[in-house]
Amino acid sequence: MIPQKQLEMVRMGLRNLVGYPMRTVLTMLGVVFGVGSVIAMLALGAGAERELLKEIGRLGIQNIIINSIKPEEPDTSSQRSNWISSYGITFKDHRQIVDTIPGIEKALPVHVSKKTVWQGSKRVEGTLYAVTPEHLDMFQLNTSVGRNLTHLDDEKLSRVCVVRSGMLTELGIFQDPIGFPLNIDNETFYIVGVLLDDSFLGYARKALSVDAKSSEIYVPYSTALRRHGTRSITRRSGSTEATDVELNQVVISVTDLDQVLVTARMLGSLLERNHPEKDYELVVPLEVLSQRQKTQQVFNMALVAIASISLLVGGIGIANIMLATVTERTKEIGVRRALGARRRHIIAQFLTETTTISTIGGGIGVLVGIGLVQVLTFFTGWSAAITLSSVALSLSISMAVGIVSGIYPARRAAGLDPISALRHE
Amino acid sequence: MKAPIISLQGVHKYYGEHEPRLHVLKGIDLDVADGEYVSITGTSGSGKSTLLNLLGCLDNTSKGAYLLNGTDVSSYSDDELSKIRNEDIGFIFQSFNLIPQLTVFENVQVPLLYGTRSIASTTDLCHQVIESVGLSDRSEHRPSQLSGGECQRVAIARALINDPVLLLADEPTGNLDTDTGDEVLALIDDLHQQGRSVVMITHDPDVANRSQRRVDLRDGIIVEAGAA
Ligand SMILES: Nc1ncnc2c1ncn2[C@@H]1O[C@H](COP(=O)(O)OP(=O)(O)O)[C@@H](O)[C@H]1O
Ligand SMILES: [Mg+2]
């Protein structure tokens, strides 16, 4: 058929739909809500995935992070005090990793310790991160004021630090913080930079063992090692606890993305050999990402399946009402047949009508879905992303629903005997 | 004399697939010459509409041959019959049979949807045909906004849109009062004058008298055929 006639049929079909607005709306409703929920579900799924990428991507998918973990002590009550517990990654491990494992671009040492930071009468608990300058770049710890740590700071063992702005507020520092002295334990460090205040999210924070409660202070690795050593002492409810951890963390960056998992396996066996007591953990963001993505995909599929059921119900609704319409319009079908309509013309007419209904319903559904997403994100704070592909998908699905749900009624209409249809009152 | 446009030869029509079948037409022989105006009369239930439906290719004969323009169409497929209905035959019904949700213009357009000509190329034609039945100012109206006589004129315009050789009318004035009925009959007379063949069912002897020949059907058999 010439497309122009198809257009004319759509136009005449629309005339039918406009003629019975209430019925048309009711017919569309299923598809409207079906498509609306598909759009919303896909948007929420895409939003969750984007969050995930942001969160884990921050760790760098080329990176592997080794954290020292305090092993479970078999018996803590007997020798509680005055005992130095020593565990975790050692300098020797670090050297071995650098020397024996191929394809490693960087292996950045990190030492973490709890310190009391004070300024005048104010004191706060902070976490001191002794890091190399590359560390700050690697995790996009950018300063909003001042500068980052440099190699020169490290070489000259400068007592400088970069802090979170939250700490300044807690310490009551409201003037220009650059060059301001901070007392960290018994040493004085000078602020050279203040970090942009976007802290690590959920998983990234855990993987980097960043304490949610106390803010971070970054100091040059060599300076901290010289000033504080590797031991730290914590006093807790009367007893003193001393720990000696040479490296709390090593951040390894692999040159070739394809080699990340292989390198992780090599690291794993090296550490297993050196640390049978398992006082470390190996975090592979790439692995975590793909696991999470898999989970997310399953979740998305479940969501879409649920939404599809409502689309199916919508399709059944259209088929049902169209069947009723066929009965109601038997006479019209007879007239059209008398005027020369072939069976396929009648089929085309009904399919055109169902497809027009479902596609318009789908279009409205897209709008409803977008609205739903706005409302949901507004009230729950969930992240959502409406993608063009989900809109295209929904519209094609609703078109398909129209065609499929029209087939049976259309065939019924076309199968009518012209004379009986004409005689029908 | 010209070759007949319609030639029925020993035509039977049964309804129903199982015994007892309803035997409606019981051996009809009928020729209609090209350009002839024939009326069919008979009591209700005598098979007039059944006969007209056969002539209109809405149905196949159960037995016997139907030659339309010299071609036997009794074994034509559904699609072939549809094409003949679309191009060669114009129907006029007692109850007008307009499509209620469409405008006058769109109703007249309907047969064009099933033909080969494009819609755009036939817009003028639609206007002309609507004008020829005197309804130019009503072309955007719905059937429900028209009187019975106007509806029937729309139906005639629709029947004419593909310029058919044969007009079939099943009691076209049955739902009209005498005056509007006369207008419609005058229109049909005009169409006959223009050279179209017309077969019209009626139970009104006055109406039948306008035709050139009367065929009286009784219980499925032609009992009387003669000049009006
Ligand atoms: N499609 C059909 N199926 C079954 N019976 C029919 C059908 N069409 C007509 N009949 C029967 O055939 C007989 C003749 O009908 P019809 O041709 O409409 O008569 P008329 O038009 O002369 O009143 C009637 O008894 C009618 O009930
Ligand atoms: Mg009848």
Image (spheres, rainbow, N blue to C red):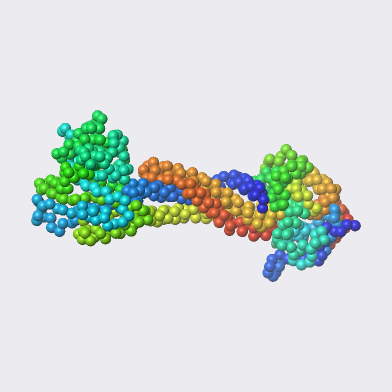
Q: Please give left or right for residue B204 compared with residue A234 in the image.
A: right
Q: Which residue is most to the right?
A: B1
Q: Which residue is most to the top?
A: A175
- For the N terminus of chain B, which image quadrant? bottom right
- Seen from the viewer's position, the closer of residues A130 and A185 is A130
- Seen from the viewer's position, the closer of residues B202 and A197 is A197
User: Could one spot residue A317 in this view of the protein?
Assistant: no
Q: Please give left or right for residue A358 compared with residue A124 in the image.
A: right
Q: Please give left or right for residue B157 compared with residue A152 in the image.
A: right
Q: In x, y percent, where is residue A10?
A: 62, 48
- Seen from the viewer's position, the closer of residues A285 and A258 is A258
- Seen from the viewer's position, the closer of residues B163 and A227 is A227
Q: In x, y percent, where is residue B106?
A: 68, 45
Residue at 28% across / 34% down in the picture?
A146
Residue at 83% across / 55% down in the picture?
B38
- For the C terminus of chain B, which image quadrant? bottom right
Q: In x, y percent, where is residue B46?
A: 77, 60
Q: In x, y percent, where is residue B137?
A: 73, 38
Residue at 20% across / 42% down in the picture?
A223
Residue at 15% across / 50% down in the picture?
A243
Indicate which quadrant contains ligand 1: bottom right
